[in-house]
C-alpha cells in the first residue's frame, strides 16, 4: 500500500506539470528576485480537529481567507485537502525555510490547533512545470 503523503506529492507534481508549460516562464519565476525557494507544507489533524468530521465541517474559514491572501501575494502556488479528509498539502514560495515555516505557522488553522504543519524544502526537478500563471 502506498503512502498517502507521497501519493499526494506525486499528484501535485503531475498537476503542476500538466498546467505549467513554458520553460521561459519558469526561468522568470526562478530568477525574479528573492522568491527562489519552493516548499511543500503538509497539514494533519491537530488537537482542535473535530474528530469524526470531514474536512468540510472543520473550523477553517479564517484558514481559507489566509490561503487566499497567500495566493494573491503569489506565495501560494497550489494547495488543497486530501480526499479522505486526513489533512491537506500545498506548495509555497519563500526566500528561506525559516520564512516558509513562519508563513505556515501564521495560518489561523495552525495557530488554533486545528491542524499540525510540517514544511519541507522542495526542489522541482522538471523546471518547465513551474509556470502556472503570470507571477
Image (cartoon, rainbow, N blue to C red):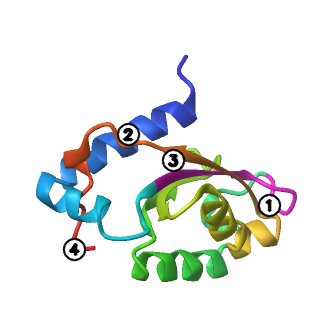
On screen, residue 88 versus residue 53, left or right, reads left
Q: Nearer the viewer, mark 4 or mark 2?
A: 4
Quarter of the view holding residue 102: bottom right
- Can see residue 109? yes
Q: Percent x, y for residue 52?
A: 76, 51
Residue 50 within the magenta-colored segment of the rendering = yes
On screen, residue 34 versus residue 39, left or right, reads left
- Name the residue beneath numbered marker 2: 11
- Name the residue beneath numbered marker 1: 50
Q: Nearer the viewer, mark 1 or mark 4?
A: 4
Q: Nearer the viewer, mark 3 or mark 2?
A: 2
Locate the C terminus by quadrant: bottom left
Query: Of label 1 and label 2, which has the lower sequence position?
Result: 2
Query: Of label 1 and label 4, which has the lower sequence position?
Result: 1
Residue at image point 25% right, 45% down: 127
Q: Percent x, y for residue 134?
A: 21, 74
- Name the residue beneath numbered marker 3: 83
Specify the label residue 134 is tagged with. 4
Amino acid at each position: 500500500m502506498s503512502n498517502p503523503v507521497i501519493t499526494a506529492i506525486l499528484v501535485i507534481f503531475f498537476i503542476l506539470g500538466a498546467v505549467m508549460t513554458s520553460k521561459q516562464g519558469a526561468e522568470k519565476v526562478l530568477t525574479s528576485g528573492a522568491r527562489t525557494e519552493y516548499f511543500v507544507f503538509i497539514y494533519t489533524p491537530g488537537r482542535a480537529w473535530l474528530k469524526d468530521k470531514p474536512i468540510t465541517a472543520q473550523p477553517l474559514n479564517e484558514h481559507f481567507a489566509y490561503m487566499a491572501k497567500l495566493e494573491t501575494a503569489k506565495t501560494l502556488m497550489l494547495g488543497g485537502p486530501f480526499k479522505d479528509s486526513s489533512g491537506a498539502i500545498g506548495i509555497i514560495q519563500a526566500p528561506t525555510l525559516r520564512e516558509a515555516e513562519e508563513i505556515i505557522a501564521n495560518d489561523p488553522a495552525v495557530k488554533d490547533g486545528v491542524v499540525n504543519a510540517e514544511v519541507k524544502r522542495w526542489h522541482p526537478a522538471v523546471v518547465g512545470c513551474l509556470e502556472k500563471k503570470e507571477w
